[in-house]
Amino acid sequence: MGSTERADRFYADQVLDRLNARMREFVGEQEMFFLATADRHGECDNTFRAGPAGFLRVLDDATLAYPEYRGNGVHASLGNIEENPHVGILMVDFLRHRIGLHVNGRARVVADEEMRRTRHGLGTDPVPGRRSLLWVEITVEEAYVHCAKHIPHLQKVKAGGAGRPWGTDDARRKGGDFFGAAAEAPGRGPFLPPPRADAATWRAEAERMLAEAERHGRGTDAKSPAFRGWFSRTPTG
């Protein structure tokens, strides 16, 4: 694109390998961010995370962490991180500064117990739906500004009714079928998961295998040697 000189100047002037003091302060003020991940094949996903100011925690000038909640059960970001640790975070302040901050780095998934054992002062959020199951810890590799010129200036308004439905299982309050996907192809979307065996099917298969093991143990099957345990060696082995 003929912009090499401009790009080099931007990297030289604006891109850090850590969070400086003003960046750390900015992170602590944010109530939301956008998270980009990809799996081992490079298939991308972009999602949104939100919580009270400070939910994205600055552990030090090279480390961020945020809690993961139960969500819709898909856990696409966590699955991607397990396969490919590279992540990109974009924080945008629409309210005051109209500026953004990019943070790129490497992530790892940490159990809540381990995080609380090694990082003190995390506290426990009393709001249902904001109780961490896991944490994502991010080692910062790049941090740089997102310019203000196209960021809209928004105004925060007081939440109406009962406020935000943290942790609700009410499909309507979560948005229902807002885009009409379920109505368009009820139960038959292109990504319908394969059928999974229910408990009764699993139990019947387990009983069948046990019965076969008992039959081998009694020596009633002439085609197979007597069953001597799942891990026993053969007479010749």
Image (cartoon, rainbow, N blue to C red):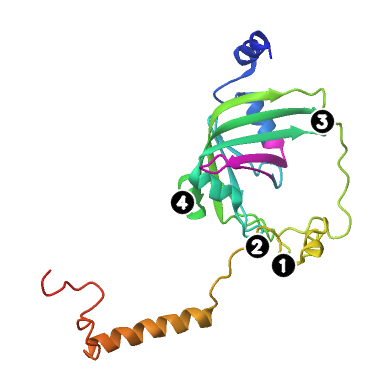
**Residue situated in front as seen by the camera: 178 or 69:** 178
Residue 36 among those drawn in magenta: yes
Report the amino acid beneath label 4: Glu
Image quadrant for the C terminus? Answer: bottom left
Lower position in the chain sequence, tag 2 or tag 4: 4
Report the amino acid beneath label 1: Gly
Residue bearing the label numbered 2: 192
The Cα atoms of the two marked residues, 3 and 1, are separated by 44 Å
Report the amino acid beneath label 3: Arg
The Cα atoms of the two marked residues, 2 and 3, are separated by 43 Å
Residue bearing the label numbered 3: 96
**Residue situated in front as seen by the camera: 206 or 78:** 206
Determine whether the residue tagged by mark 1 lies in a helix, strand or loop: loop
Q: Nearer the viewer, mark 2 or mark 3?
A: 2
Q: Which residues are magenta?
A: 28-47
Residue 43 makes an appearance in the image: yes
Determine whether the residue tagged by mark 4 lies in a helix, strand or loop: helix
The disc at residue 187 is 1
Determine whether the residue tagged by mark 2 lies in a helix, strand or loop: loop
CA neighbours of label 3 inside 10 A, class few (<14), some (14 to 19), many (20+) = few
CA neighbours of label 4 inside 10 A, class few (<14), some (14 to 19), many (20+) = few
Query: Is label 4 in contact with label 1 (beta carbons under 8 Å)?
Result: no
